[in-house]
Image (spheres, grey):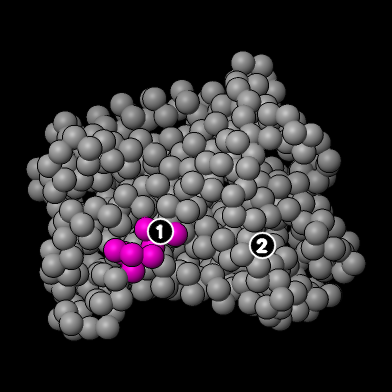
Amino acid sequence: MKREEFSSSLGFVLAAAGSAVGIGNLVAFPVMASKNGGAAFLIMYAFFVFFICLPVMLAEMSLGRHTRQNPLGAYTEIGKNAAWRAVGWMSVITPFMIGVFYLVITVWIFGYLAKSVMGQLEFLAAPDSFGVFINSNELFIYMAVVIGLTFLILQGGVKRGIEQAARVLMPLLFLMLIALVIYVMTLENAELGVKFFLIPDFDKMTGKVLNGALAQAFFSLSLAMGILITYGSYIQKGNNIVQAGKMVAGLSLLVAACSGLLILPAVFSFNPDVQLSELSESSISMIFTFLPKIFLALQTNIGYLGASFIASFFFLLVFFAALTSLVSIIEVPVASLMDGKGVSRRTALYSLGGAMIVLAIICALSFGRVDLFTSLTSYGLGADGLPLAKSFFDLVYDIFYETILPLNGLLLCLFVIYRWKKHNFDAEISQGNSTFAGSLLQKYINFSLGTFIPVILAVIFVNTVATVFFGKNLLF
């Protein structure tokens, strides 16, 4: 079959930006930044995005466009041995399993959107509402809707599905984000949040904070998930990969910065005496337990209908971000099955979708409804020095998102520079970019991918394994 392609470089940029802009950028990043140096954290985040993450991004995109393959096909075609084929398999299984828990989170967001539209802010703001909601039967109705929307987009293929959805959803997402920022800035005490986010405090830039900024940059750009290899295989040969990569990185950074001007001013308008230590850096905690209280408090000034509208607007924004990321994640195993077995897109979707839905249901049942899935295993160490009980959801998240991603990134760097070779990598990037060969950027990318970036990713991988599974932080 003829390889599907994005219709233009802009189509790729919007689709890739859709995968990069997720709930972590919109919600967790502002609190993380404000707790760890404000603008100083933002500056370091931007530095890591362009000097560490961009080379890895270009490596993935180039590998995909050169081979016109999914991650498994790319590693197999160039690697030509069982070891690299195993790395390819890992690069396909990882997004599949990440898609399982990300589907569950997207369903939660859609459920909160539906309840906001129905004016149920009092329920959402109640202390135990999240626990009640995630264990309710209605959750599976919302899951059916989210699965239907996701499959509808993916079934349309690259141009009429993924690209068309990105061309609609991403501009809407940016416009909604800007509109919410403008509204929040009109609230009383909003300037306190701006102060915490934008005034730099370099005294807080410890090694732990720098590690957090790098991890946030790496994960927020969807690196090492196989997404950019797969999307890269849909890029036309004449497109400028470097320019496209810079635009994706820039858009992700812009969303992170704007989200800081949304979340923090909203928090301080709700409670000007709030202590940043009280705020969780977890996207889950902020979206589902803290922010609904802010929306409910807005009714004092703009009435219940106004507060419900703002809440619905916010959850629609977050839902768009989650949906575009979910589509990107699932496309990786779908493309792998289509390429490897020669099956149609619909057959691949239904085959993989069935397995993913079963695993997502197990994840959804692992929050108290089924004891076997809720207390599946135990590892790591709690504050009392005893192993922590872990659910099926925790296990999937810890293994495939926290641990394997930096390992995938490390292996990608080694593969591109030492197996595919620098000259082949450079030749691919140079297509559509005549100024790349011999440039300072070329020298930096080749040097960084072959030296310190793999070392950094190796350190992150080892420390993550030690911290998550053994409760021993080796660095801090």
In the image, residue 368 sits, relative to residue 464, either above or below, namely above
Q: Amino acid at mark 2?
A: Met
Q: Main secondary structure of the magenta part?
A: helix
Residue 454 magenta-highlighted: yes
Magenta segment boundaries in residue numbering? 448-456
Side of 183 relative to 352 (left or right): right
Q: Dot 1 surroundings within 10 Å: few (below 14), some, or many (20 or more)?
A: some
Question: In terms of depth relative to the viewer, which is nearer, 82 or 226?
Answer: 82
Give percent across and percent down for residue 306: 76, 60
What residue sits 26% from the left and 41% below the top?
Answer: 88
- What quarter of the picture does the N terminus occupy? top left
- What quarter of the picture does the C terminus occupy? bottom right
| Quadrant of the image occupied by residue 347 | top left
Tell me the residue that label 1 is attached to.
Answer: 455
What residue sits 52% from the left and 41% below the top?
Answer: 465
Query: Can residue 67 be spotted in the picture?
Result: yes
Tell me the residue that label 2 is attached to.
Answer: 32
**Mark toward the viewer: 1 or 2:** 1
Residue 127 tag number: none
What's the CA distance linking mark 1 and mark 2?
25 Å
Give percent across and percent down for residue 442: 24, 76
Residue 21 magenta-highlighted: no
Give percent across and percent down for residue 365: 61, 23
What residue sits 16% from the left and 60% below the top?
Answer: 421
Q: Amino acid at mark 1?
A: Val
Query: Can residue 220 be spotted in the picture?
Result: no
